[in-house]
Image (cartoon, coloured by chain):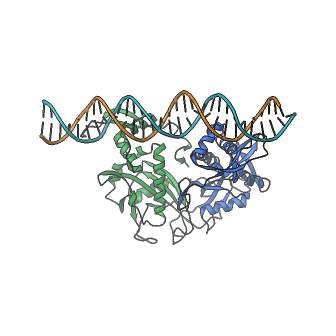
Chain colours: A blue, B green, C cyan, D orange
Amino acid sequence: MVGGAVTASLAVSTVIFTLLEHEGAQRLHLPLVRRTREPFDGAEALPGGWIADDEGLEEAARRTLVETTGLRPSYLEQLYTFGRPDRSPTGRVVSVIYSALVRSPEAARVAEVHNVRWAPVDEVRGLAFDHDEVVAYALWRLRAKVGYAQVAVHLLGETFSLGQLREVHEAVLGRPLDPANFRRRVTASGAVEATDEHLTGGRHRPPRLYRAVVPEGATGPFQTTAGPAA
Amino acid sequence: MVGGAVTASLAVSTVIFTLLEHEGAQRLHLPLVRRTREPFDGAEALPGGWIADDEGLEEAARRTLVETTGLRPSYLEQLYTFGRPDRSPTGRVVSVIYSALVRSPEAARVAEVHNVRWAPVDEVRGLAFDHDEVVAYALWRLRAKVGYAQVAVHLLGETFSLGQLREVHEAVLGRPLDPANFRRRVTASGAVEATDEHLTGGRHRPPRLYRAVVPEGATGPFQTTAGPAA
DNA sequence: TCCGGTAATGGTCTACGTGACCCGAAGGAG
DNA sequence: CTCCTTCGGGTCACGTAGACCATTACCGGA
C-alpha cells in the first residue's frame, strides 16, 4: 500500500442483460441475487463481490459473475464507478460497475441453478444500495449504444437471421422496427456478413443466416467503442 | 470497513482540457505536473491525489485539482477506472479518472503558478503510470462527444461569437469546419441563443454574441449525456 | 475618401441516410 | 392448390449536412 489511501472496500457489480421469452415476445431480462446478510438483508441486488488482491477489475467482474450466477458473458464493458461516502450503511464501499451481455442459451442453461431470479428490465425496482439507479443508467447506455455499435450480436449465437437480430433490437429499444428498413441499415453498415446457409424448419420462407463481422482495429490498447482495455 | 476488501489505494486523476494559443492558432492543451517522489520520480503525470475518507469521487477530483493546479473546471465528468494490479510498481492503486474542461481565462490565470506545464495534446508522451493511454482515451471521448453534445461551450466564457465556438470545435477535432454550415447546424440545434450584443474591436464585421442554452432535464438523478450523478 | 481584404451571415444545390410503404418470392399448413 | 406469413428487394418523400456562392460590415491603407 502506497499510503494516504481512503479506508474503503472495493467491489464490482455487473448489470447483465439477456433475452428471454416473456408474454409471447423476446424481452430483455437481467439476473438478480437475493442478499443473505446485512446491509439490505433479504433484498435483491446486482451480482457482484469484492475485488481480490491480485486481479484486475474486469477479471474480478468475470469471477464474481461465475461465482454468483454461473454466467459467462459474451460482452463485458466497464460502466461507471459509484463512490458516494454514504452508499452503504455499514461502511464505505466503492463499486466499479460493469455491463454485460449474455447469449440466450447460456442464460437458459443457468436459469434454474443458483440463487438467481431473472427479472424483466422494466419491472426492476427496490434493489439494494443504489442499484435501481445503476440499472437505469446501464439500460440507457445499452439503448444508446445499440444505435451506433453492433453490440446486439452478443445476445445471439454464432449465426443468426436478420429477423432474429431485428427482434433483439426491438427488445432492447422497446419498440417495433420496420423489417425492410432494418435490413437495409444493417447490411449497409457492414456489421454483418451473409453466409451461404439458411435457417430451415420455420413455418415460412427460410431466412439467410448472417455472421457478425469483427471490426477492424478492435484489438490493441483500447476498443474505441467500449473504453480502454486496462 | 465491511470486510473482504482488496488492499488497494484509491486515487483520482483528471485529464483537463483547455484552449491556449500555440503557433498562431487556438489549440487544445492539458496541464501536467512533475512528480517529486517514487514511483516515476521526475516524470510528468496527470494531476490527482488520494481520495479522502468522507468525500465522494467527484468531490475528490475537484479538491485535488485545486490543490495541485489551482484550477476550477467548468465541466467535469467521470471517464474510466483503471485497476490493473501492476499499474504502479510500489503497490496496488486503483485510479478513478475524470475528464474536465476549463475556460481559457481560468487556465491563463493559473498558468504561471504551481508546478504545472501546459502541453499541447498531440505532444503528450512519456507520462507516468498508464497516463499516456488515459489521455488518448479522454481525447477520443471528447472528440466523439463534441459531435452530439454541446460541451464545447465550457471552454469559452459566458458569451461568445459563433466564430469563436467554431474555433473551439476546430481545435478539438483538429480539422477546419465550414463557417456557414457550422452556423446553420449550431443555431438549428437550439444549443445556443442569440444576444443583442456584438463583439466590437475586431478588424472585420462585428459578430453577434451568443449564450449557451442550459438543456431541459439536465438536472435530476443523472444527466443522460454524462452519467449518473452519484 | 475610397478601396481592398477578410470575417460574418444568409442562401442554394446536391448527396445521402432513413422512415413509410409496396410487392413479388418462398416455404409450410390446411 | 390455396392461403398465410415472413423474407427480401424496391420506390418515394423528407430532413440533414457538405460544398459552394453572394452579400454585408468593418478595418486599414492608399
> Residue B86, image x and y in percent?
55, 69
Residue at 39% over, 51% down: B174
Q: Is residue A71 visible?
A: yes
Location of residue B217 with respect to A45 vertically, above or below: above
Left or right: residue A108 compared with residue B96:
right
Residue at 48% over, 59% down: B134
Count of numbered circles on the image = 0
> Residue B116, image x and y in percent?
36, 61
> Residue A111, image x and y in percent?
77, 53
Left or right: residue A163 compared with residue B153:
right
As rendered, which of A109 and A61 lies closer to the eye? A109
> Residue A128, image x and y in percent?
67, 50
Residue at 46% over, 58% down: B136
Left or right: residue A166 compared with residue B154:
right
As rendered, which of B192 and B219 lies closer to the eye? B192
Position of the N terminus of chain A by quadrant: bottom right
Left or right: residue B196 compared with residue A78:
left
Position of the C terminus of chain A by quadrant: bottom right
Q: Is residue B159 visible?
A: no
Location of residue B93 with respect to A154 vertically, above or below: below
* Quadrant hosting residue D2: top right
* Quadrant hosting residue B199: top left
